[in-house]
Image: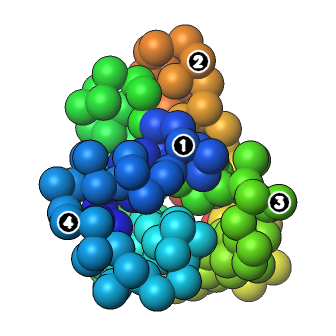
């Protein structure tokens, strides 16, 4: 059910994630929603956005082990390229979707989104610091990477073209090689 909620959130935003839509997409029986999510729809939506956020954190953590900053950004770009083409540009980032249209629809959404973006930036900054960047610069670059990739995903969806992600990777590469 969470996987279905993540996909629906990516495609439709939080307003499009209803219990009926999740059940129809997942094929789960109605009673299982309230068994697994006693808080109902809102608990399910927050669980879905947390799951999506954790997936990206895990990807960044894998790159942290190697200390390869370039590989980290390439993995993020490759992930989004696959996700966009697999869904014919219908599905974007569920965390961004929650940030853009759900702050008032789902109680606690603003806090969860803020926490996830902070985790992403902290994870990226850690990889950048391990890759030789000064701490303050690593934090600024982490903000830039998150902002650039998230913005590129939005542009890719709007243009139905992967070019913005290619542009971000091309411009990030020299930036991430300079350690001063």
Marks 2 and 4 in Cβ contact (< 8 Å): no
Residue 97 appears in the picture as rendered: yes
Nearest the eye: 72 or 105: 105
Q: Which residue is mark 3?
A: 104
Relative horizontal placement of residue 128, taking residue 82 as reference (left or right): right
- Give the CA separation, mark 2 to mark 3: 25 Å
Give the x, y percent position of residue 169.
Answer: 50, 39
- Kindly report the distance in space between the C-alpha atoms of the residues bearing marks 4 and 1: 19 Å
CA–CA distance in space, label 3 to label 1: 14 Å
Q: Which mark is residue 16?
A: 1
Ranked by sequence position, the earlier of labels 2 and 1 is 1
Q: Position of residue 66 (x, y in %)?
A: 31, 79
Q: Which mark is first along the chain, 1 or 4?
A: 1
Q: In the rendered view, how is the structure colored?
A: rainbow
> What residue is pinned by disc 2?
158
Name the residue at 32% across, 86% down.
Answer: 35
The location of residue 3, given as percent across then percent down, is: 29, 61
Task: Give the answer, above or below, for where 160 lies relative to 56.
Answer: above
Q: Residue at label 4?
A: 29
Q: Is residue 45 left or right of residue 3?
A: right
Front in this rendered view, residue 179 or 12? 12
Q: Position of residue 14 (x, y in %)?
A: 60, 51
Label whose residue precedes the other's in the sequence (2 or 4): 4
Query: Within 10 angstroms of label 2, few (less than 14), some, or many (20 or more) residues?
Result: few
Residue 159 position by quadrant: top right
């Amino acid at each position: 059910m969470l996987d279905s909620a993540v996909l629906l959130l990516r495609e439709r935003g939080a307003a499009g994630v209803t219990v009926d839509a999740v059940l129809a997409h997942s094929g789960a029986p109605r009673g299982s929603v309230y068994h697994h999510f006693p808080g109902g729809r809102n608990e399910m939506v927050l669980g879905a956005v947390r799951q999506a956020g954790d997936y990206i954190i895990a990807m960044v953590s894998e790159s942290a082990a190697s200390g390869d900053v370039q590989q980290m950004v390439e993995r993020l770009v490759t992930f989004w390229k696959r996700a966009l083409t697999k869904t014919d540009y219908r599905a974007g980032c569920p965390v961004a979707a929650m940030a853009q249209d759900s702050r008032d629809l789902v109680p606690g959404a603003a806090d969860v989104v803020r926490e996830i973006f902070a985790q992403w930036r902290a994870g990226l900054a850690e990889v950048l610091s391990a890759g030789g960047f000064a701490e303050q610069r690593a934090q600024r670059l982490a903000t830039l990477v998150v902002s650039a990739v998230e913005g590129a995903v939005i542009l890719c969806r709007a243009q139905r073209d992967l070019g913005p992600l290619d542009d971000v990777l091309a411009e990030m590469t020299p930036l991430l090689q300079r350690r001063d």
